[in-house]
Amino acid sequence: MDENIETALQSHGERALQRLHAAGCAWPEAATPMLQKVALASDFAIDVLQAQPAVLAQLLADARQPLPPPQLSAENREQWAQLLRRYRRAESTRLIWRDVVETAPVEEILAGSSVLAEGCLQLALAALEAEFAQRFGVVRDAQGQVQRLVVFGLGKLGGGELNFSSDIDLVYAYDSEGESDGARVLHAQDYFARLGQQLARLLDDVTADGFCHRVDLRLRPFGNAGRVALSFAAMELYFQREGRDWERYAWQKARCVAGDLQAGARFLETLRPFVYRRYLDYGALDGLRAMKALIAAEVTRKDMADDIKRGPGGIREIEFLAQALQLIRGGREPALRSRSLLTALAALEAAGHIESQAAAALTRAYRYLRTLENRLQMLADAQTYALPEDAVLRARLALGLRYPNWAALHAELAQWRARVAEEFSALLAPRRRRSHDSDTLALYWRALPEHGEAAQLEAAGFAEPAALHASLCDFARAPGVRELSDAARARLDRVLPALLQQAAGCAQPDAVLRRVLPLLHTLLRRASYLALLDEQPAALTRLVDVLARSALLGERLAAYPLLLDELLDVRVGSELPDRAGMRAQCVAVLREDDVEASLDALNELRQALSFRFALALLDARIDAAECAQRLAWLADAVVACVLQLANAELRAAHGVIAGGRFAVLGYGTLGGEELGFGSDLDLVFLFDAPIDAVSDGTRALDAPRWYARLGQKMVALLGARTGAGRLFDVDVRLRPDGAKGLLVSSLSSYADYQRHRAWTWEHQALVRARGVAGDAALIADFEQIRDDVLAQPRDAGKLAEDVRLMRARMRAELDRSDAAMLDLKQGEGGLVDLEFLLQWLVLRDANKQPALLRPRATAALLGAAQAAHCLAAGSAAALLQAHAVLLDAGLRCTLDRRPRRALRNDAITHACAAIRAEVVHVLGE
């Protein structure tokens, strides 16, 4: 280090200690190195200790303990400003001591600065409120409820990360309109505006003791031109009509820091949809690009390259990066809605939206830059972010941060800023350059509808160019396209040619284009999804791939664009939720005080999860059996949640049946855990209650009527249409006596029916039946009845005849096979033949082989039949393979919106032959 600088530093330290001695400060010799560190880091702290010698004694005793705040009362009104300023200066000096002497983590210093600002705000506001109450009374709304000022802290105060000498961004509001009840009446708006202005002056005005906190009110609605305080209703109206992108970033960190904290928290919850959109919101990047451009222009204009906040690779780039990713996904992922930047980075990493290495680097860079920022401001309690030019100040900073010299500090700072700039630039990277083909298709699209020729589509590789050209012309003429904003039209002009190019390169270009146009019609009303496809080429590629392989998923995307989120969800390629996980997710979205909202949320979740299972099947990450099983588990979870909602409604309307029990049974593909996409649910409802039981509500019902209404309510809720579609169609015809029977059966009547009046085909259906929701003890009672019925001894010949006759009748009525195509379900050697075969084996042998009673799914039944020696090992293996082939073919037909019929290729023919051979062998057909 330069000799002159060393001399200057030594002289500076000596003068600082002499000033403290002269002011009467005393300290043990062991504390001298501590004070030398403080003197090196902060002239401000030495000034404070000189003015308030008692502070030093408190710091030497225990610097971790916050200093006591002042008492503001009517008796010391003239001293309020001085008391607040001396307190803020003393407590700020404690934070310097914790940082410089005791090396506390930067998070503690930032949080301490935030708590200090909040404390001063709350002290000042409480004193002013008491004064206003004496002069004007308190404000009351139309119902007589007292209204208080609500003070929102935005920016770093809201995030609890205030830098050492920052201003505080405040917005004033109040819950409801009204008037004060004192001798001099003020309207709420005037009352709270005056109160807010006095609060700002009490903190902000520079006096002989300096300032307490600089207050910035410019982030309020309409900025300096807006009212100082607004009602919540006026605030909501503003954000609905006028809210801009930068305000979403600003209010993302908003927190109520003084005044009516509960009212403030309620308002922020109502504002959440403005900040965090319901869908993946890549449109947030446009707002960020605009803000970044303005800041970059300011940096260039004012030569602020050495500004560690706003300059390249500075603090603001880390903040903007994290906030943008939060805004994009926070509407769908509540865990990302943190006000704290470090917590947000951790959440983004945990959710897979930032790679671990990048998250670690950004976290370290943020801590480094915030520490340096604080040290810059601690020097003289100045709100500065610029690196000093003075050599002595540079040396003080470097030595205070344990560097040998300024060059060493500056070199590491440059490394961190370069890493931050790299990550930030990657987030806002220019969109991928289009190929020559895409440029050609862009010219074609922009010429529509008046110009452009079908031959251009033919040249790109489309098989039916004339028809597709006509569809694209119709789309270009659509009002939704003509009415787009300039920004949205620019996005469409980039997205559509890219879609055409991607479609042209896939196996089914015409199908993709036909399927994507309905989706685009929907997206014209959802600018955030146009932004997603524009900003994320991977999502566009994935979309084309999905549309090429599934007409059903294309229809669902067009109907429910929120499913586009799944194309970029990092969880799509990872482990799928298990049965318990799906149940937990479904329960988590319920709002028992709002059935409609619950159904809508359940529908969205069901759509998203079934879409994810479909993608996993198409990508060969799961096989057809696992896909069908997961769809059944999802249905189980949904039915259990709907039962919970229906039960709550019945209880509210009619009270509770004491000792009553209710259960939902799943039959068919639900019971067998082999559900398809779009399958309906075969449900049977059971109840059990004491004789003459009556509900205890004001509108009492006897047990049969109570449970009948519960069953009716469940069917209605499952089939109710919401914004995300219907949950499930329900078929209740498998109940005792079918359509003529009661919707909900008592346990005793169900048992009697199954034992004495049920047909053989109803016992066949019972093989796959299982409890899916409701009272566990009642489901156990059902299991016992099922076991008893299925294990009854039967005449094998009569049983075989019943099964053959029912199968022949079903085939005659339902089989849609022909010479070229097989009906996968009802055709000869199809899935129903296999089901009938296994049902026959269970009904014939369960009385001798109880293990046959446990499984419901086809694969498990085949395993049990082999273990019980009802089927030879080779036969069971052949049937298992046949079932896998047919089930897979059926699911893929559904995904491609085709009837469940398949060409009789080698795999299908072999599968049918295996099933047919075993049916002939066992049943003698």
Image (spheres, helix red, strand yellow):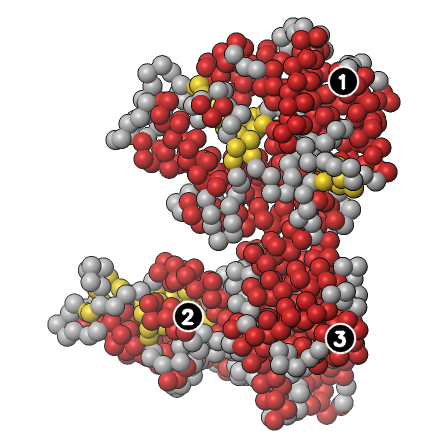
Assign the C terminus to one quadrant of the image.
Answer: top right
Q: Residues within 10 Å of mark 1 (few under 14, many from 20)?
A: few
Mark 2 → mark 1, Cα distance in angstroms: 70 Å
Q: Quadrant of residue 826?
A: top right
Report whether 921 appears left or right of 570.
right
Q: Quadrant of residue 84?
A: bottom left
Residue indicated by mark 1: 925
Residue indicated by mark 2: 240
The vertical placement of 644 against 379, above or below, is above
Residue 252 image position (x, y, % from top left):
51, 67
Give me the disc on residue 455.
3
Assign the N terminus to one quadrant of the image.
Answer: bottom right
| The furthest residue to the front | 819
Give me the disc on residue 318.
none
**Residue at left offset 83%, top offset 40%:** 905
Label 3–label 2 contact, CB within 8 A: no
User: What's under tag 2, amino acid-wise?
Assistant: Gln
Pick whichever, 899 or 515, lies toward us. Answer: 899
Mark 3 → mark 1, Cα distance in angstroms: 58 Å
Instruction: Let me know if residue 53 appears in the view.
Output: no
Badge 3 or badge 2: first in the primary sequence: 2
Label 3–label 1 contact, CB within 8 A: no
Badge 2 or badge 1: first in the primary sequence: 2
Residue 746 image position (x, y, % from top left):
44, 19
Residue 143 image position (x, y, % from top left):
20, 59
Report whether 825 appears left or right of 147.
right
User: What's under tag 3, amino acid-wise?
Assistant: Ala
What secondary structure is found at the residue carrying circle 3? helix
